[in-house]
Image (cartoon, rainbow, N blue to C red):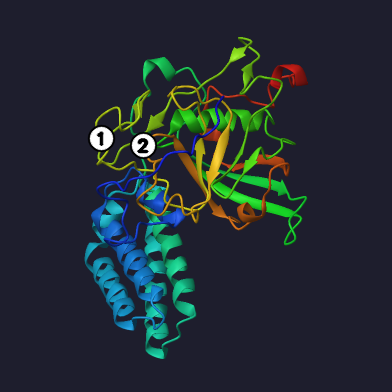
Amino acid sequence: NGVLSTGVVATPPASASLLTAQQPVSDPRELLRDALPINNKPIRKIQKEIFTKITEAVRVPNVKMSEVQDAVSSSQKVLAKEKNAILKDVIGEAAKQDAKQTLASIETRLNEFQTIIDTKDKQEIPIKQQEVLRLVEKVENDMVGEFPFKIPQDYASKPLLMGRASLEMKLTCKSSTVTNGGTMKIVLDGFNAPVTCGNFVDLIQRKFYDGMAIQRSDGFVVQSGDPGQKKTGFIDPSTNELRTVPLEIMVQGDKAPIYDSTMDDMGRIKELPVLPFNAFGTLAMARSEFEENSASSQFFFLLKESELTPSGTNVLDGRYSVFGYVTEGKELLKEVKQGDTIEYIKVLSGSENLKNGYDPSKQIPESSETVA
């Protein structure tokens, strides 16, 4: 019935998407940076120095200033020596000019970082870290060229997201003592899950989720997307049949996702997906436990703090299609209860990346019977 099954005892995989040997990366923006289809070593080096070393340094009660210093100095050296190697991979002349300015801004921020280190201003470290990483991300985004792989013929005519999209979801909380609700920002990654993302954006454009109840909130996941009336998913008005999407998982090192099979079924249990269940607010499609291609409209957010899924030991990686992360407002998920309401989900940017999808400006809105 499309409901996520949780009654499995997790066993740790051989490795995980690691920050260190013990600590997987759980920051959604860093996971999204890692998932970009680019291969520029200098910019990745700066990204990892600033994210990994500084995140580790501030994790301890007394910030390891030597580690912060090391990360900043290493990044400054890379920028001084490898600027041209970074710019070489930026696509298009206008973007190259833009990237030059962004690299200059990174240089400025790194110099400001030095002042923070000299004055031992611990509170400012994570703020400046995020400023640098946002600029690094901007350069990395400018390196993404054509869509990196061909969609399999079986799915090429489905709604597809050929890139990324940013969403806003507004939730109303009826029984929380903390909040009446609020909004979350979500980034969908069509570079690694184009069929799954395309299906979701298509349903958003149809306002399928607007006004729908949260159907499960149990400390493990927050889940919705079941339209009720015994339909379990989206009935496509053009076919009058349930529309489903395949299981879709990009494995690290692969050039295209695997479809229709879990990583276990493929004998790849020791490998890692590009989009792991590492972050609080990881977004994935629910499906019937024994039918890999049964996902339709039901989705869930993983509540990462659950003891059922300690980092690197969850049973979900490689078995369910992850297609995005909550990047802002994830605290709201802690307050959402079953019966609360999704007021709306809307696309903030990236709708131009939707192919074969519903365009509300060109169609007469469907009746409630066909969309329910």
Badge 1 element: loop
Extreme bottom residue here? 119
Task: Identify the residue position indicated by label 2 in the image.
Answer: 318
Decide: few, some or many residues near mark 1? Use Cα within 10 Å; few <14, some 14-19, many ≥20: few
What is the x, y in percent for residue 149? 33, 29
Write the residue at 34% across / 82% down: 65
Examine the rendered structure and indicate whether residue 292 appears above or below residue 324: above
Q: Nearer the viewer, residue 87 or 360?
A: 360
* Marked residue nearer the N-terminal end (2 or 1): 1
Q: Which quadrant is the C terminus positioned in?
A: top right
Please report the residue visible at 21 percent of the width from the left and 66 percent of the height from the top.
Answer: 81
Outermost residue toward the left in this view: 81
Cα distance, mark 2 to mark 1?
A: 9 Å
Whether pointer 2 and pointer 1 mark residues with C-beta atoms closer than 8 Å, the reply is yes
* For residue 274, above or below residue 363: below
- Side of 43 where 98 appears, left or right: right
Is 218 left or right of 246, judged from the image as shown? right
Say left or right for 327 vs 169.
left
> Would you place residue 370 above or below residue 122 in this image?
above
SS under mark 2: loop
Q: Amino acid at mark 2?
A: Gly
Camera-side residue of 182 and 360: 182
**Would residue 367 be seen by someone viewing this image from the given angle?**
no
Percent across and percent down for residue 155 are: 43, 19
Residue 214's spot in the image, x, y percent?
Answer: 67, 40
Asked if residue 160 is positioned above or below residue 166 in the image, the reply reads above
Q: Which residue is mark 1?
A: 268
